[in-house]
Image (spheres, rainbow, N blue to C red):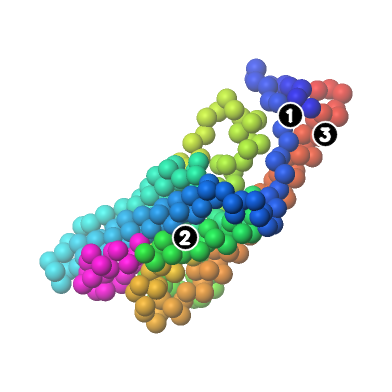
Amino acid sequence: MGKDIEVGGGYSAKDYQDPPPEPLIDAEELGKWSFYRAIIAEFIATLLFLYITVLTVIGYKSQTDTALNGDQCGGVGILGIAWAFGGMIFVLVYCTAGISGGHINPAVTFGLLLARKVSLVRAILYMTAQSLGAICGVGLVKAFQSSYYTKYGGGANELADGYSTGTGLGAEIVGTFVLVYTVFSATDPKRNARDSHVPVLAPLPIGFAVFIVHLATIPITGTGINPARSLGAAVIYNNDKAWNDQWIFWVGPFIGAAIAALYHQYILRAGAVKALGSFRSSPNI
């Protein structure tokens, strides 16, 4: 261990060993302030995320309301809404990555739990903090703009008319897969060690993944890919349609996150380990 392996192009990469998997239940972290600081960071980040993004959605609908002399071509549009979601994720992941890992999404936390990147206790408390943060964030929107909030749907995720349940579920699965796969790739310590000469700002591709998925799926489900985001809006808006469709925004993201975790950890990473072993054993290298 510790030997350099020539990889071509004048660069070299040091042998890399993955950190050990996180224990399922880590009693020691319960006595650390950094653990509770991380939970607080997840709560505040998700609160801010929902506050800004739901305000953007409601603002767009009010600006395009022809009954109030709005312009159908005015406002930020779907593109602007997608930028709001993606941009906020970029900002918040950048701010909280060094404190909590910048999950801000139960589906991301679930994927990392399956990959043994976080303990079960941390995952459960993260998801709880994210859900409560989302509820409080949307609650602030309603408190500040009650009439607009109720009139324009409260930013709640619902399956759009004309789309089947299967289509909506599929959109959430694939959309979350894109996001969680990007999270794994952008934060992969092996990749960072191998390509240390190529600087990667992880929040940037993660934010772009959220942006792109929103462009594709806003017309179908309003884009969930984040169970806390969907739950927060449903709790405060409290509409039958939002509650009836709520399961889609939990089952879909959790399935997508699980597939992304398995794909990255047990196909891509396992294949990379085998390839590296074959290079080492080859007499021509």
State whether the magenta stretch is mostly helix, strand or loop: helix
Task: Specify the farthest residue to the front.
Answer: 31
Q: Residue at x 68, y 25 (%)?
A: 13
Q: Percent x, y for residue 51? A: 33, 59
182 left or right, relative to 266: left
Task: Specify the farthest residue to the left.
Answer: 69
Mark 1 touches mark 3? (CB < 8 Å): no
Which label number is shown at residue 128? none
The verdict on residue 147 being magenta is yes
| Quadrant in the picture for residue 74 | bottom left
Q: Which residue is mark 2?
A: 130
Counting residues from the N terminus, which is met first, the one under dot 2 or under dot 3? 2
Q: Which range of residues does the magenta coloring cover?
A: 137-155
Number of labels in the image equals 3
Q: Which residue is mark 3?
A: 278
Q: Amino acid at mark 2?
A: Gln
Q: Residue at x 68, y 50 (%)?
A: 22
